[in-house]
Amino acid sequence: MLTLARDLKRRKARERQSLFVAEGVRAVEELLRSPLQIRGALGTDAVRRLPRGQALVVALATRQLPFDEVSEKDFLSAADTEHPQGILAVAEVPSQTIASLRLGPIARILVLDAIQDPGNVGTLVRTAAAMGAAAVVALPGTADLWNAKVVRSAAGAHFRLPLVQSSVDELLTFLADHQVPLWGTAADGAPIGAPIGAVAAPPRLAIAVGNEGAGLSDRIRAAAAHMVSLPMAGGVESLNVAVAAGITLYALRQ
C-alpha cells in the first residue's frame, strides 16, 4: 500500500490505474460512507491515539479492508500535506464520462475551464455539491479532479456528485444533444450579456468559470449563449473564482 500511495502522487499514475488517494481523517470518513470501492488504507500509530482515527481503523477492519501501519517517515513520503493526520486511503476513481451523465428536467452543470489551482478546484467541487449542481466538468488545463489536494479541499463532495474530465468538443456535443445552454462568467460580462439575474435562467444550464488569470478560453466564450457577471462595488476588480462561482450558482438555483 505504501508503494502504491507514493506512486499515486503522480497524475499519470492515477490516470493509468484509475485510483486516487483520500488523505486525512475527514476525507477517509467521507470515503467510507460513500459507495466507492476502497483498496485499503495506510497510517501511523499516531492515528490510533485519536478517537476518530481509532474509529476509522476499526471501521476498516470491520469491512475487511487492509490497513498498513508504517513509520512516520514512510507515511510522510506518501502524504501530500505538510502536516498530515496520519491516515490515508486508496480508492477507485468512479467510471464516469460526460456521455454517461444523466440530467433531470432541472439541472446545473459547473464547467471548469483551465482552473489551475488544486485548492480552487476542490472548493469549486464542494461549492457545486452544496448548491445542488448535477455535475462538474473539467476541461483541459484544469487541475486533476482526483489530485489529493483537490480531494481534501472538496471535503467529501467528490463522493456526492458526478465529476468528469472532458474535451471542449465532447462538452459542446453533449450540451447540444441534451439542449443545455452554456453561459460564461466574466468580471465585466463582456462582450455580451448582463449582470447575473438580468437574464432568465433556463431549467437546464451549464455555467463555465475560467482560469484564475486569463478567464474563459476563446472557444468557451464564443460558444456561450450569454456572458454574465456579478455586479460589484467600485474599486473591486474581481473575486476569487470559487467565491464567484458560489455566488453565481446560488443566484441561478431553481
Image (spheres, rainbow, N blue to C red):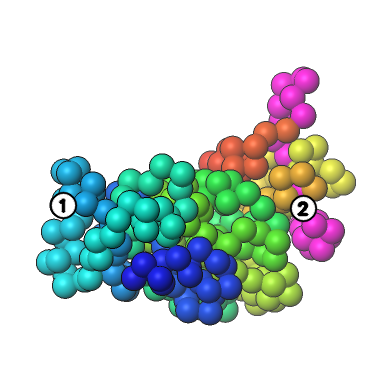
Can residue 163 be seen here? The reply is: yes
Residue at screen point 72% across, 21% down: 233
Q: Which of marks 2 and 1 is nearer the N terminus?
A: 1
Residue pictured at 67% horizontal, 53% vertical: 116
Q: Closer to the camera, 97 or 251? A: 97
The answer to the question of whether label 2 and label 1 lie on touching residues, with beta carbons closer than 8 A, is no
Q: Which residue is drawn at 41% across and 53% down?
A: 76
Q: Report, in whole angstroms, how far the alpha carbon at label 2 lies from the one at label 1.
A: 44 Å
Q: Can residue 104 be seen in this view?
A: no
Residue 198: x, y in percent?
A: 71, 39
* Mark 1 lies on residue: 55
Q: Which amino acid does label 2 sit on?
A: Leu
Q: Please check the rendered image and state whether residue 225 is part of the magenta-colored stretch, yes or no.
A: yes
Label 2: which secondary element: loop
Where is mark 2, residue-wise?
A: 216
Q: Give, as a single range, the part of the protein colored magenta.
A: 215-237
Q: Quadrant of the N terminus?
A: bottom left
Image coordinates for residue 73, horizontal then vertical, percent: 37, 53
